Amino acid sequence: MHRRALALAAVTILAAAGLVAGATPASAAVVSLQSVVPVPVTVQPATGVTYTLPAGAAIQTDAGSAAVGTYLAGILRPSTGYALPVTTVSGTPSSGIALLLSGADSSVGAEGYQLDVTASVLTIRAQTAAGLFYGVQTLRQLFPGAIEARTVQPGPWEVAGGRIVDRPRYAYRGAMLDVSRHFFGVDVVKRYIDHISQYKLNTLHLHLSDDQGWRIVVDAWPRLTSVGGSTQVGGGPGGFYTKAQYSDLVAYAAARHITIVPEIDMPGHTNAALASYAELNCDNVAPPLYTGTAVGFSSLCVGKELTYTFVQQVLNELAALTPGPYLHIGGDEANSTSDADYRTFMNRIQPYAGAAGKTVMGWHQLGQADHTPGRIAQFWGTTTSDPDLSAAVAKGDKVVMSPANKAYLDMKYTNETPLGLSWAGLIEVQTAYNWDPATLVPGVPASAILGVEAPMWSETLTQLAHIEFMAFPRMPAIAELAWSPQSARNWDTFKVRLGAQGPRWTTQGISFYRSPQVPWATAPPTGGRVEAESYTSQSGVQIVADAAAHGGNRVGYIDAGDWIGFSGVSVAGRTGFTARIASGGTGGTIQVRSGSATGPLLGSVAVPNTGGYGTYADVSTSLTAGSGSLFLVFTGSGGGLFDIDDFALTGTTPPATNLALNKPATADSRCATNEGPEKAVNGTTNGGNADKWCSVGATKWLRVDLQSSTAVGRVVVRHAGAGGESAGFNTRDFDIQTSGDGTTWTTAAQVRGNTANVTTSTFGPVAARYLRLNVISPTSTSDQAARIYELEAYAA
C-alpha cells in the first residue's frame, strides 16, 4: 500500500480547481446572513427580503472610500460581467451598492462596519476605510460562491436581506509566513495576502531571515542576499526581495488594510548572515551555508562591536522600507547564546528599533531582557505557563498569542498529512478553533492580549499549493478567534459555516484540506470535470494533498472494495466516463454504478500502472443508460491500487421536467375570461397579452394541483416582462406555498421588491401535491393587476 509522503514537485495549480463546468445558475439558494466566517457580532435577517444585483448597478462611494469601491468592483466585475462603475454618492443611495464613511452604528469602532441589505440597495457603513473593507469581505461571502470566478457566470447575484453590525475582538489579527526556510516570490506572497485579508486578518508577519536564507536586500551589507540568500532547505536556489519588491508587497498589503511586520531573527537563527560575512563571527571564520532544518546552533557574536553596527544598519534600512509600527527582532531558540549574553544583546539592540521610530516585537523569550515602551511579546509555547512570558507581562509587554500546539499552521492535521511537522502535536481544525486566547495562559490577563497570529513555517513547504493546503481550513478558524466575540463562537455552528466555504475555495482555485471533522458543502455539477475529493459519501479512501492534482488534492489509499459516492451527480443521460488516475501499484478497475455502491453497473474501466503515483493519465469507458446518483466502486487485488484526481461524465443530461405543465390550475379571480389560471401552466409565454393569468387586486392566489405528492425544490415564475409587457408590471411581492392536502399551506419562499422578468425560488426540496402563488403586491406601479405568464415547478 502506498503510504508515502507527497513528492514536493513544483507544478502549476489550475485556477479553476474543483469543477470546470458549463454555465449553471450561480446559486441554488440565497446565502444566509448567518453563514459568515468570522461570525459577526450581531445579525438581524429580514425575512422575505432579497437584494438582486442588477446589471446597471453602480458602486457609490464618498470621500475616502473610493479605493475600497474599486477593490470591490475588481471582485465583482469578472464573474458578473457587469460594468459596475465606481461613482461619487449623491444624496441617500436608493439603488446599487453604497460604501459610506458615515452613519454607522457607534459600536463599530475603528475597524467595524454596518451592512444593510434591502430589496433595492446594499449599503456598507463604517468609520474608516478599513471598516468598509471588512464589510466588503462579509459581502463577498453573502453573494453566491460563483462571485469569486474570474470568468462571467450566469447569476442571479442575490443577497439575503437584513442587517449586520460587526467589529473585531482584537486589534492585532495576524498570519506569519516563513520565507527563509523556503523562499516564496512576490506573486505567492500577494496571493497569501489576498487569502488572509478575505477573513479579516490585518497583519502579515514576514520571517525574512534564518539559518537557511536571508531574504531582504540591505545596501550596507550586500552579501547578505548575494551569498546568504542563495540557498534554502534542501539546497534549492533560494532567492530574496529587492527593496522595490518589498515595497511593492508593503503597498499591496496596505491596499488590503494589512500591515507588514518584518522579522530579522537574532541573536540565533543567523547562520545565513554569518556565512555571508566572516567578520560577524567571533573567530572571523564564515560557516558554510546551511540547508538543513536543525535549530539553535548559530549566534551573532555578542562581544563584537561590529555586531551592533550590523544590527543597527539592518534595522534602520528595514524601518525605512516599512511604514507599519513594528520591527520583529526574533529572539527565540538562541541556544548557542548564554543567558547573560542574550540579555546583553537584547538590551543593546532594542533601542535601535525605537530610534528608527518603531516598536519592538519579538518571541516571548524577550521577557528575559529589559522592557522597552510598547513592546510586544509573541507567545509560541505549548504549555499554559511560561516564565519568560510571565516576566514579559510583568514588565508591561502586550502579548500576541501564537501557541504552537494550537495556531501553528505548519503542524500536520493527522499522522497521514504528507506536509508539515508534528513536534508541537497534530492540529486538526477543531483543535485550531477550540481555544480562547484570553484564558489559555492563566497568568496572562485578558487586558494584556493584543491579539492572535497564525504562523506558517516552511521547512516542508515549497509552493503555493502547500501553503494553501496547510492554511485552509485552519487559517479561517484562527481568524474567527481573532475577530469574533468569544460568546458568539461555537464549534458545532462554526464547522457548518466553514464547510459552506468549500465550494467558494474551489471556485478560487484554493488547495485545501477536506477535514473529516467538517461537513463540506458541495456544488452539484451538471457537466464538466468533477473533483474526486468532492464526494458526499465514501468507504475506505482518504484525501491526499498533491500539487500535481487538479485542485491540489486527490483521492488515494484505495483498496479493493473501497468506493465513493456523489449525491449531487446524476448519471441520467450520461453515455461516457473519463477519469484522471495515477498508479504506482497493481492498478485495478473503476466500476461506475448508480444509486448505491451495489447499484446497477453502468460500465467499468481498467486502470493500469501509470509509472508512479505522480504520473497521471486518463482512462475512459462507455456507459449504459441509468438514473440516480453516481457511485464509483474500486476493485482489484490487494491494496494501494491507484489514485483518482477527477472525472467527467459525457452525454446530455435530460432537461428538467416541469411538474406544473398542463396540470389543473385554479385562481380566486381573473381579469378577463380568456386570462384564466390555465394560461399560467400551458408551457408558453408567446401567445400575446392574453397568454397569462391576470388577477386584479392584492392578496390574490393561483393554485396548481400536481395530481400526486412529489418533491418540489424550485419554482420559476415568468412575469409581465417575459410575456412582452412592460417590466413595470412584473409582480413585486409574492409567496410560494406548498401543501399536501390543499388546506394546510407552508410558505416555501418569499419574493419581495421584485423587478425581474423571471424569478427563480429554490428551496427544500419538499413533498407537495399542491402549489400556490400568493400575490401580496401586484406591481411596483399604481396598477393593481398581477400578470403571471407561466408558473413552473421542478424537483430541483
Image (spheres, rainbow, N blue to C red):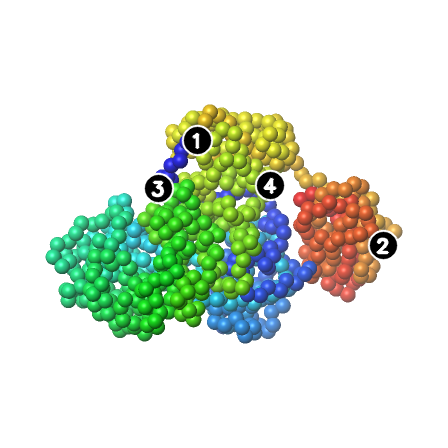
- Closer to the chain start, of discs 1 and 4, is 4
Of the residues tagged 2 and 4, which is closer to the observer? 4
Of the residues tagged 2 and 1, which is closer to the observer? 1
Residue type, numbered disc 4 = Gly
* SS at mark 2 in the image: loop
Q: Dot 1, crowdedness within 10 Å: few (<14), some or many (≥20)? A: many
At a point 32% along the width and 54% down the height, the residue shown is 179
Whether residue 614 sits left or right of residue 234 in the image: it is right
Specify the farthest residue to the right.
Answer: 673
Image x and y of residue 503, in percent? 53, 48
Q: Dot 2, crowdedness within 10 Å: few (<14), some or many (≥20)? A: few
Q: Dot 4, crowdedness within 10 Å: few (<14), some or many (≥20)? A: some
Whether residue 650 sits left or right of residue 303 in the image: it is right
Look at mark 3 in the image and give the residue it sits on.
8
Look at mark 2 in the image and give the residue it sits on.
668
Q: Nearer the viewer, residue 428 or 152?
A: 428
Q: Is residue 313 visible?
A: no
Up the image or down, 781 lies above or below 11; here it is below
* SS at mark 1 in the image: loop
Which quadrant of the structure image shows residue 6?
Answer: top left
* SS at mark 3 in the image: loop
Residue 455 numbered mark, or none: none
Q: Quadrant of the C terminus?
A: top right
Residue type, numbered disc 2 = Asp
- Closer to the chain start, of discs 4 and 3, is 3
Measure how far apart labels 4 and 3 are at the Cα level: 33 Å
- Closer to the chain start, of discs 2 and 4, is 4
Image x and y of residue 741, in percent? 81, 47
Measure how far apart labels 2 and 3 are at the Cα level: 69 Å
* SS at mark 4 in the image: strand
Residue 568 numbered mark, or none: 4
Measure how far apart labels 1 and 3 are at the Cα level: 20 Å
